[in-house]
Structure formats: structure tokens, C-alpha cells
């Protein structure tokens, strides 16, 4: 679980909110960190948001697996 609300900026370099990242994961059916990077450019500047982006991805994959 991450502490971000959906409208919180997760990647400040790309100005990506948690919601932006979740939407990309769901719309494009992404399942790896690299795919999320390719699609959103998240964590491609300083990389300090990488762990948060990965945590959001893991949360989404868990939900996908559980059919949520
Ligand atoms: S905060 Fe995401 S690349 Fe710098």
C-alpha cells in the first residue's frame, strides 16, 4: 500500500499523479515497471519516485489478480 491519494503527484519531474499511473496501467494492461516507464516516462529523470511507482504497480497487479 502506498500513502498517496489519487490526485497526489507521485513523479514530480513528469507531474504524474497516482491516478495518471493507475490509468496507464489499466488502459494499456501494463504489468512491469519497464512498461510503466515506457508508457508514462515515470522515474526516467531522477528515479527517486521509482519505488513509489513500483508500489502502485504492485497494488494494481494485486487488484487485477483478485478481479477488483
Ligand atoms: S520524481 Fe520521478 S523522475 Fe524525478
Image (cartoon, rainbow, N blue to C red):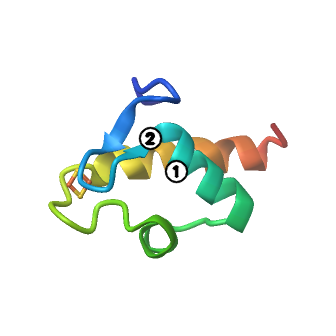
Asked where in the image residue 33 lies, by quadrant, the reply is bottom left
SS class of the residue under badge 1?
Answer: helix
Q: Which residue is drawn at 55% across and 40% down?
A: 19
Q: Are marks 1 and 2 in contact (CB under 8 Å)?
A: yes
Residue with the most extreme left position: 46
SS class of the residue under badge 2?
Answer: strand
* Residue designated by label 1: 21
Q: Residue at x 39, y 23 (%)?
A: 3
Nearer to us in this view, 20 or 3: 20
Say left or right for 36 vs 60.
left
Q: Residue 66 at what x, y percent from top left? A: 79, 41
Q: Residue 35 at what x, y percent from top left? A: 51, 73
Give me the disc on residue 2: none
Q: Residue 52 at what x, y percent from top left? A: 35, 44
Q: Which residue is drawn at 34% across and 48% down?
A: 15
Q: Which residue is drawn at 69% across and 67% down?
A: 28
Dot 1 crowding, Cα within 10 Å, few <14, some 14–19, many 20+: many
Say left or right for 60 vs 16.
right
Residue with the most extreme front position: 15
Rendering quadrant holding ligand 1: bottom left
Whole-number angstrom distance, CA of label 1 to CA of label 2: 7 Å
Disc 1 under 8 Å from ligand 1? The reply is no
Residue 47 at least partly seen: yes
Q: Is residue 5 above or below residue 62?
A: above
* Residue designated by label 2: 17
Nearer to us in this view, 52 or 19: 19
Quadrant in which the C terminus is drawn? top right
Q: Residue 63 at what x, y percent from top left? A: 71, 41
Amino acid at each position: 500500500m502506498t500513502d498517496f491519494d489519487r490526485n497526489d503527484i507521485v513523479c514530480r519531474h513528469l507531474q504524474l499523479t497516482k491516478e495518471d499511473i493507475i490509468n496507464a496501467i489499466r488502459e494499456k494492461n501494463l504489468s512491469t515497471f519497464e512498461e510503466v516507464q515506457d508508457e508514462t516516462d515515470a522515474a526516467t529523470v531522477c528515479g527517486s519516485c521509482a519505488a513509489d511507482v513500483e508500489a502502485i504497480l504492485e497494488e494494481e497487479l494485486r487488484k487485477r489478480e483478485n478481479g477488483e
